[in-house]
Image (tube, rainbow, N blue to C red):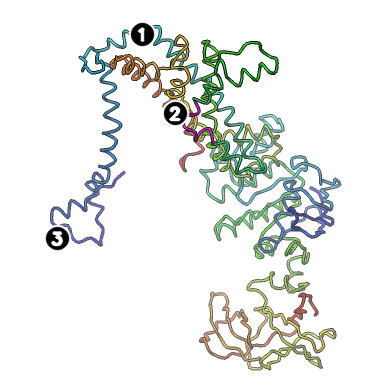
Amino acid sequence: MATVELKAVRKSFGRVEVLHGVDISIRDGEFVVLVGPSGCGKTTLLRMLAGLEEITSGEVRIGERIVNKIPPKARDIAMVFQNYALYPHMTVFDNMAFSMKLAGRSREEMRQRVDVAAKILGLTDYLDRFPRQLSGGQRQRVAMGRAIVRNPQVFLFDEPLSNLDAKLRVQMRTEIKELHLRLKTTSVYVTHDQIEAMTMADTIVVMNNGNVEQIGSPLELYDNPANLFVAGFIGSPAMNFLPGRFAPGNSAAVKLSNGSELPAPACREANGRDVTLGVRPEHFAINASGVPAEVVVVEPTGADTQIYCRLSDTEVTVVSRERHMFKPGEIIRLQPMPQKTYLFDPAGGRRLA
Amino acid sequence: MTPPHTQVMTGTAPPVSALSPLARLFESRHFLGLLFMLPAGVLLLLFLTYPLGLGVFLGFTDAKVGRPGEWIGTENYEFLVTDSVFRLSVWNTFLYTGIASVAKFGLGLWLALLLNEHIPFKAYIRAIVLLPFIVPTVLSAIAFWWIYDAQFGIVSWMFQRLGLIHNYIDFLGQPNLARMSVIIANVWRGVPFIAISLLAGLQTISPSLYEAAAIDGATSFQKFWNVTLPMLSPIIAVVMTFSVLFTFTDFQLIWVLTRGGPINATHLMATLSFQRAIPGGALGEGAAIATAMIPFLLAAILFSYFGLQRRRWQQGTKD
């Protein structure tokens, strides 16, 4: 177990810079999720941690050591790959024992450590099988077993669940989380799925276009997004963004293009300016004092109802715990809950209030 | 396997009784299967089975060019066993196939590994590597003939200029030198096929396996030994089977370069068979020599089929 420090880390492929100076510091035993859309540089960053990509500039520290020039095998890390990267010609046992075999450990030690890992992961009965004879979830476990056996300082996960079906993904999500609670090894986990990030992380690092947008605990990011990008990325369904003009006053409001006024948080900086009002779908109340919106589609999911409607010129999503039986075309009235709205600068996306 | 034809006709087809016998025939999976296989079957019979059967049959006769022979049983083979030239040709064939195949495999694998690296002008280099394979055998054999020539050969000229030798080497004029020379020519021709096939195999190996191995602590050689070689073994088996078969039955190169000489030192079974049968006129004996190659070829195929090609890890989900 160890801390991980990234300082002003940059990466260029040829002339193209894909990471523009990333600073992250990870506590011992922390489970950190790097999340962001495809191409944001999160996997590249993980591979730089692993030593599979060179670090163009900056400093990567695992524990006390600067590892910039240290090869992967000497970094004391283990990695779970997206496609598992199991050796197809080796049995589960040999896959898990391979690193120890290379290190020249005794047969007995290999047997013992593989057995322990296999027991944790429920693979004891499959040690003689080849990867091809396993299901997706089992292969995923073998990949984790290979990492556990090494007892590394840091676990690195590169979208390990994206090749699994939805049900198994939820199950493995829990298993990885449990495993982390049990082993308490510092972990860095890359995913593009914000739900995975929210459910598993101690700390989430939201990345976009090679920059870190915000670092924080899942609920911090949900309650206090630093900018438009984080606000739109965290939370499902995504936050609604309504363009309008800020109208100051005793009860501040944002005036939409059709004249409707929605209550907004107070903000001196925004006086008389164009702003973007952010409201989460679950923070709309449907009641008579709200602003009118036209229902487009209603999707009952059982536990809640998702209503897509047109408010002014913008499509907004509303999630309600009640079972509404609105018809498309019907006019409903929406009111944001007090203290649950956000103001953003439309140019640049900075949070204003 | 085809299911019984009673199950084939599903709900959409009209009831069986409503169809005429001919229509019913054309609905039958067995009949249609036979019908569709017919063209391929005829071609195989005509151009494969018939010549092969005729060759084997001729081996048991004393046919000469222009005279249909009589059945003489195994007399040809009894003679060949005692024939020192034939025995030499068997030895030559094994030597030629053995050395050339090992050399081709080694060089081919090496070349494939090189071409799999990131090098500038990769596409062009790959195309150039294929050239020896594209040039007609006879043409490249003639080129080698010039290279080896006792009076004008470029190799001799070069060595002499370098001061290494005083007299030109007669590459194709001395038994062991000639053997070496034809083997080199064969290797030159055969390497591209192996290199390109193995390169194709190398490119199917997922890079993440090497990354996993790097994290597991493998050195370059350990990666090669534990990942590349086992992952490549199925394609190696197939490629080397083909290579051995082609080398074992090689004819053109030898015939153009040495015609089996000097003093039969480079006679392979294929060239000897041709020489005895066509220029020599002894069709029956030539056919017997050719037939004698079959067991060796079968053994080579079976060896690779059972010994190398099938691995447990490649098979499906069976316990």
Q: Is residue A80 above or below residue A169?
A: above
Q: Is residue A50 magenta?
A: no
Q: Residue at x 66, y 16 (%)?
A: B160
Q: Is residue B260 above or below residue B9?
A: above
Check chain identity for marks 2 and 3: say if they share one.
yes
Residue B73 falls left or right of residue A144 = left
Q: CA distance from mark 3 to mark 1?
A: 67 Å
Q: Which residue is mark 1?
A: B81
Check chain identity for marks 1 and 2: say if they share one.
yes
Counting residues from the start of the chain, the first of labels 3 and 1 encountered is 3
Q: Tell me the amino acid under the disc marked 2.
A: Phe
**Are the residues at dot 3 and dot 1 in contact (C-beta closer than 8 Å)?**
no
Q: Is residue B138 above or below residue A80?
A: above
Label 1: few (<14), some (14–19) or many (≥20) C-alpha neighbours in 10 Å: few
Give the numbered dot on residue B306: 2
Extreme residue in the right direction? A64
Which residue is nearer to you in this view: B196 or B312?
B196
Residue A312 falls left or right of residue B170 = right
**For residue B201, what is the image quadrant?**
top right
**For residue A267, what is the image quadrant?**
bottom right
Residue A189 in percent (x, y) is at: 70, 55
Main secondary structure found in the magenta portion? helix
Chain ID, mark 3: B
Q: Residue at x 80, y 56 (%)?
A: A10
* Local SS, label 2: helix
Residue B154 in percent (x, y) is at: 60, 21
Q: Which residue is mark 3?
A: B18
Question: Which mark lies nearer to you, 1 or 2?
Answer: 1
